[in-house]
Image (cartoon, rainbow, N blue to C red):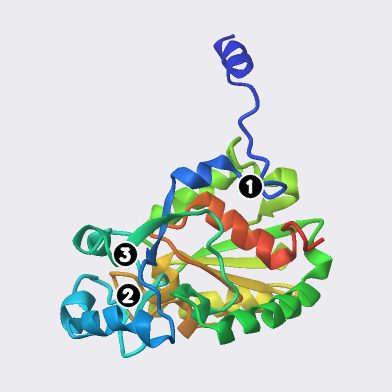
Amino acid sequence: MPWLTRGLRNGIVTTHYPRRKDGYGMYWRAAVQVCSSNSSAKSDLDGIVGVAADKFALERLCPTEAISVDGVGIFLDRGKCILCGACVAARPDLFAFEADIELAVLDRRMLIVPRSEEEEDDLDRIKEELRNRTVALRRSVHIRHVDVGSDGSDEWEISALTNPVYDIARLGIFFTASPRHADILLVTGVGTPGMTESLQVTLEAMPKPTVVMAVGSDAVSGGIVQPGRGVGQLLDVDIWIPGSPASPFSILHGICLAVGMLKGDR
């Protein structure tokens, strides 16, 4: 009976998230942030404008063209970022890893950091619209996962959601093989042309209201495999989750964000 003694020794390993934050987040290199301040004040722009003269060299740091530089400042698109760390290693004065698990957003523009004040203002409106649409899904949520050209890494993270650490069944969240029983369409992969019809058929078979989630940088932007693609070209996406691959916590955050399970949403 080694499993019994091991269970008693380990105790409860299941996270309390989303009821409260999980301490794991402080150790996870979840995303890259821009260290320099993109302020409208001239004094803050002096250093950035100097960097802008080296625009070509900065943008070449990223293999997926996630970095952009203009007269306003330096921006990084987390939807394109594959977390290779090349920018952090080359310019630690401008880029750094951020430890967080709540990376899912409701609008593709919100993955570009630093965010503008106008985009932050739009967030409340978008969140309220989605909350009103999915209010009936909070007690029991079924997910249909479709792979449209993934490298397999995102699938490993998704499957981890059912293990004892995350145990999404405790929240009333389940995976289903039938789109007719699904509330959320979870999509991974770059969005290959051969899967376009299958994806549309799956979405049409799902009962309304339907939530569509793009999981991982491949699904968000095409990643390093097919830059410029992503599932946003195939259907309307409600939740965008960056990462290469996206962590189980980030995926869980996206699901909870979609159906109003986060603190303050109930």
- Measured from the top left, where is residue 194 in percent x and y? 40, 77
- Measured from the top left, where is residue 232 in percent x and y? 49, 81
Q: Residue at x 63, y 47 (%)?
A: 21
Between label 3 and label 2, give the one nearer the viewer. 3
Q: Which residue was labeled with disc 1?
A: 21
Image quadrant of residue 75? bottom left
For residue 183, say whether it is visible: no
Q: Residue at x 61, y 68 (%)?
A: 185
Q: Which residue was labeled with disc 3?
A: 95
Q: Amino acid at mark 2?
A: Ala
The span from disc 2 to disc 1 (Cα, nearest Å) is 29 Å
Which comes before the other along the chain, label 3 or label 1?
1
Quick check: marks 3 and 2 in contact, CB under 8 Å?
no
Quadrant where the C terminus sits is bottom right
Which comes before the other along the chain, label 3 or label 2?
2
Q: Amino acid at mark 1?
A: Lys
- SS for callout 2: loop
Q: Which residue was labeled with disc 2?
A: 66
Between label 2 and label 1, give the one nearer the viewer. 1
Image quadrant of residue 243? bottom left
